[in-house]
Image (spheres, rainbow, N blue to C red):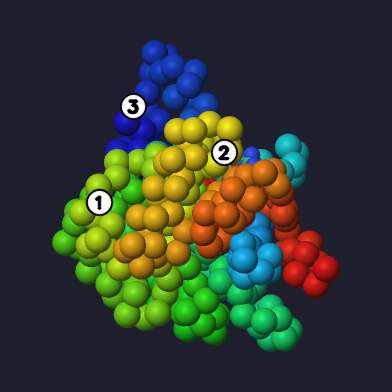
Amino acid sequence: RVKAEGRGHYQYFSESMTDAARDRIHLDARLRQALARQEFRVFYQPLVDIASGRIVGAEALVRWLDPEEGLIPPARFIPIAEETGLIREIGAWVLQETCRQGREWLDAGIAPLVLAVNVSGHQIRHGHFGAQVEDVLRTTGFPAASLELELTESTLMGEREEITELLEWLRSRAIRLAIDDFGTGYSSLAYLKRFPLDVLKIDKSFVDDIPHDRDDCEITLTIINMAHTLGFKVLAEGVETAEQLAFLQAHGCDMYQGYLRSKPVPAEAFLKLLQG
Ligand code: C2E
Ligand code: MG
Ligand code: MG
Ligand code: MG
């Protein structure tokens, strides 16, 4: 594996190295350069309260503004960054930039918004993550209670003791915790009870075919009811149609995000959404 050897060990690879491996090394190098050259951008997608229709927050979603290729979506570089571990640096930058932007909005008199940041398992496992979050909150002055961290089920299935401790610490600092892509991972009801969570985000794949697909409707209802029983809020991801929204509203889903309201947009455009 490339990542085990670290950087600068190209000599271990001979002509037998596949094109795919070469592409990966090349992309990894470009990503490191992109970080150094500040080519990453954070886009914001509204999180909407279903009952009131109001924007209550935003999810921060990273993009790469490549000088030649233009805007590159995370699907094209996050998987590699996860493989090489560079996601730790990219994730740290996204957290810092989002909290900086959030503080700027507060200073401009914008009502407090929840800003949700995606966190990779790498960050949790190797990053002195608690100290890093503390540091970002202190240096930016962004309120802990306005920060939401999105974790996935697979991240939580790891070393339980340490992760439980970390999550409890984050919670004690009033930071909110969400499970992203809920239902797609290796779910266990036991961990839902164990971890101090605030929000379950129902994965888009379950939302896509409601209200037409009976199974997806049932799954969605089950997640909503289970979350509420455990005291969590529920957010539906990837809502694109008024029909989907009506179904979610009728069944007590708390929040949604999706193209129906807005795609992820740059900070200035998000501000216009808030004011419009
Ligand atoms: P995610 O965290 O589940 O984010 C939601 C994704 O769904 C976003 O894709 C968003 O643009 C997309 N989406 C939201 N509503 C709709 C909709 O109505 N229709 C459709 N077709 N898509 C919708 P995006 O921005 O391309 O991000 C993809 C994934 O990349 C994210 O999924 C997340 O797993 C990862 N990602 C993005 N930014 C970061 C980051 O800063 N750190 C980490 N670790 N991962 C990130
Ligand atoms: Mg997310
Ligand atoms: Mg998601
Ligand atoms: Mg995801």
Q: Nearer the viewer, residue 12 or 67?
A: 67
Of callouts 3 and 2, the N-terminal one: 3
Which x, y percent locates residue 72? 66, 41
Which x, y percent locates residue 9? 37, 35
Q: Which mark is residue 210?
A: 2
Ligand 1 within 8 Å of disc 3? The answer is no
**Disc 2 versus disc 1: distance between alpha carbons?**
24 Å
User: Identity of the amino acid at label 1?
Assistant: Leu
Q: Nearer the viewer, residue 143 or 225?
A: 225
* Residue located beneath label 3 in the image: 12
Residue 244 versus residue 192 in the image, above or below: above
Residue 265, quarter of picture: bottom right
Residue 91 visible at all: no
Q: Are marks 3 and 2 in contact (CB under 8 Å)?
A: no
Badge 2 element: loop
Residue occupying the point 22% across, 62% down: 194
- Classify mark 3: residues with Cα within 10 Å, few (<14), some (14-19) or many (20+): few
Residue occupying the point 35% across, 55% down: 226
Q: Considering the image in quadrants, where does the C terminus appear?
A: bottom right
* Residue located beneath label 1 in the image: 189
Residue 275, quarter of picture: bottom right
Badge 3 element: helix
Of callouts 2 and 1, the N-terminal one: 1
**Disc 3 versus disc 2: distance between alpha carbons?**
51 Å
Residue 106 visible at all: yes
User: Identity of the amino acid at label 2?
Assistant: Ile
Of callouts 3 and 1, the N-terminal one: 3
Using residue 108 as the reference point, say whether residue 151 is left or right of it: left
Closer to the eye: label 2 or 1: 2
Closer to the eye: label 3 or 1: 1
Q: Which mark is residue 50?
A: none
